[in-house]
Image (cartoon, grey):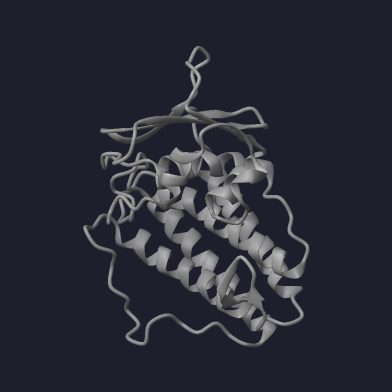
Amino acid sequence: MQNILEFPEVLRLIEDRSAAFRAAIASVPDLDVQVPSCPDWTLRELAQHLGDGRRRQAAIVAAGPGAEPPARTDPKGAPTAPRDREALDAWLAESTGLMLDAMREAGPDRGCWTWWGRSQAPETSGAVARHQIQEIAVHTYDVQLTLGAAQPLPAEVAVEGVDEFLTTVSATTVPWPFKPATIDLHATEGRSWRLTLDADGVRCADLAADAEPADLAMRGAANDLVLYFYARIPLDVLEITGDTTPMEQLADWDPNA
């Protein structure tokens, strides 16, 4: 695999996407409208989710290694996001700041609890930070979509997002229960990856120049690949060559079930 972003750059992108989320939320006329891409939530509930989630990640990173996530210290659960617009903006900024402070204190290599123990991603604060870029970026897209002004993810975020999703969310050591397959993914920005699905699990690697054709090839802008991964756009937005069955199976498969 090619080198991922350096830790300071990861933190910078978290700050950038968090600022974009706050700007989008601040421009919304009504925070009580439903989010089309997250239909169970209003924009206010999405803001609550993002703010509380960053505070929760701050506690997880600060706690260090553990077999289970740290217990919540607030017996009432998640703090409620303020209804006042200025106070909400400050609360969201503070939430991101708490998480970034915890990550800077821990550094990229310190272990911490994660939900992806069987993936190719390490169980470290650096890997948590890398995943946070994508969570915040996709939810920023959700707010923009609700406003009717969805914007593509920045190219560096999207290309990083393809790699991060494949190594953290898709990859697993749980044996693949279906017919073995290979899936190639090509970002028009110039990166290509191969997923191998077989009895050893699902593994991601950079696509070798001399690789044999895969069972399925998917090509598109990195933004479209990421938004497909997170079920924001349909598969047919991408250029497809081959049988889509392995990708559809992978999307529906829960290796922990």
Considering every residue shown, the one lying at the far left of the view is 67
Which is nearer the eye, 14 or 211? Answer: 211
> Residue at image x 63%, y 57%?
17
> Residue at image x 32%, y 78%?
73
Which is nearer the eye, 24 or 206? Answer: 206
Residue 124 higher or lower than 144, as above or below: above
- Quadrant position of the C terminus in the picture: bottom left
> Residue at image x 42%, y 80%?
78
**Residue 19 location in percent, x, y?**
66, 62
- Quadrant position of the N terminus in the picture: top left
**Residue 120 location in percent, x, y?**
35, 39
In the picture, residue 237 is in which quadrant?
top right
**Residue 188 location in percent, x, y?**
67, 32
Asked whether residue 199 appears in the rendered view, the answer is yes
Which is nearer the eye, 41 or 234? Answer: 234
Q: Is residue 120 left or right of residue 1?
A: left
Asked whether residue 12 appears in the rendered view, the answer is no
Considering every residue shown, the one lying at the far top of the view is 210
